[in-house]
Amino acid sequence: MNRLAWAVLALLSLTGSKAAAQQAPAAGGGATTAATTAATTAATTAATTAATTTLDSLHVSRVPFARPGLASADPNGVLFVADARQNIVQLSPTGQTLLTYSMPTRGHLAALDAGITGKVLAFYDDRQQITLFDRFLSPIATMQLSDYPGTATALVRAATLAPDGTIWLFDERDLALLHLDPRDPGALTRVPLDLLLTGGRSDVRALRMYQNRLYLLDRTSGVYVFDIFGAFIRKIPLTGLTDLQLSGDELLILDADGRTLHTEPLYSPTAAPLRWALPPAAAASPGWARAVAGPGGRIYLLTSGEIGFTARP
């Protein structure tokens, strides 16, 4: 091969190398672009999934019960429920009637709390009276709030038991929390709430001690959270609620139509709520009237004529 042929071959080889070098970055850039697009799509999908509630159907077993009212479950899953005559009925976790307590003098049951092991609190707002029961519905103590100096002028609307045996009350007249020890009713602690609640517009429906926190439900402004000493921590801005049910790390809420349950996180505002469809209630009822949270994910559904027993998956 002569010198001219060698020069042509060398020139062709050099041109091919430059072309390959110019194409390599383009290929790399395409891979980077594809990876970026995939990552963005995955992130968007994950965000959408986190914000989407799951909708599952719950299986409900039922027992007949005429016009159930207030209800509360103890740590063993035993349900205490008021009947139409304000008697307190104890039901097993499967719905079997165990015991019934009939108050000697009829009163309006405004709060029923069985959340503390071995004790049940019943508060009658028309009589301003608290009765404590053991787990067999035998009365342990009865307190007439008007008989004690710290509560003589109070207008109590809600009450709940604390793990140490003390009782938290909400005084509507003075807009205050009252912390009462049944062993020493004279030693009462008062926590003013007039700077938190909205005065005449407040509508406090429930108090509940749960996981070392005190929860107060005001239908008009939300759920207020306090520590075990009554110090304010924060407010959960959920309005329109009429009942306060706590399950796991969430609020359990029965929707207004009585056909859907959903949760709201207590501690992580970014956590996705869960939602469950409910089977129809009794034929005469448009939907379930009340949902009660129990231990281990148990849920009790109440409506005129029956009580349903289910559990979250």
Image (spheres, rainbow, N blue to C red):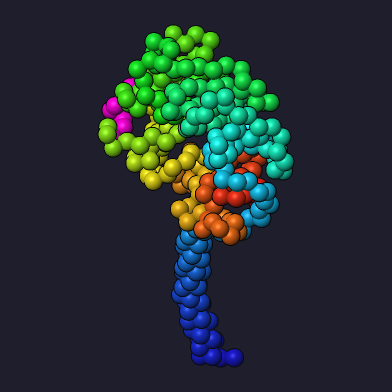
**Which segment did they paint magenta?**
192-198
Residue at 48% x, 79% y is 19
Q: Up-down: is 272 above or below 108?
A: below
Residue at 35% x, 17% y is 153
Give x and y (percent) for residue 239. Answer: 37, 44
Answer left or right for 66 relative to 199. right
Residue at 32% x, 25% y is 173
Residue at 38% x, 41% y is 219
How many tags in the picture?
0
Answer left or right for 90 relative to 216. right
Q: Residue furthest front?
A: 105
Q: Is residue 273 visible?
A: no
Q: Up-down: is 173 above or below 265?
A: above
Q: Up-down: is 159 above or below 252?
A: above
Q: Is residue 98 visible?
A: yes
Give x and y (percent) for residue 181. Answer: 50, 14
Magenta-drawn stretch, dominant element (helix, strand or loop): loop
Does 194 lie within the magenta span? yes
Give x and y (percent) for residue 277. Answer: 57, 58
Answer left or right for 81 relative to 269. right
Give x and y (percent) for residue 98. Answer: 71, 34
In which quadrant is the N terminus drawn? bottom right
Does 296 lie within the magenta span? no
Q: Up-down: is 24 above or below 108?
A: below
Q: Out of 132 and 309, give the one closest to the viewer.
A: 132
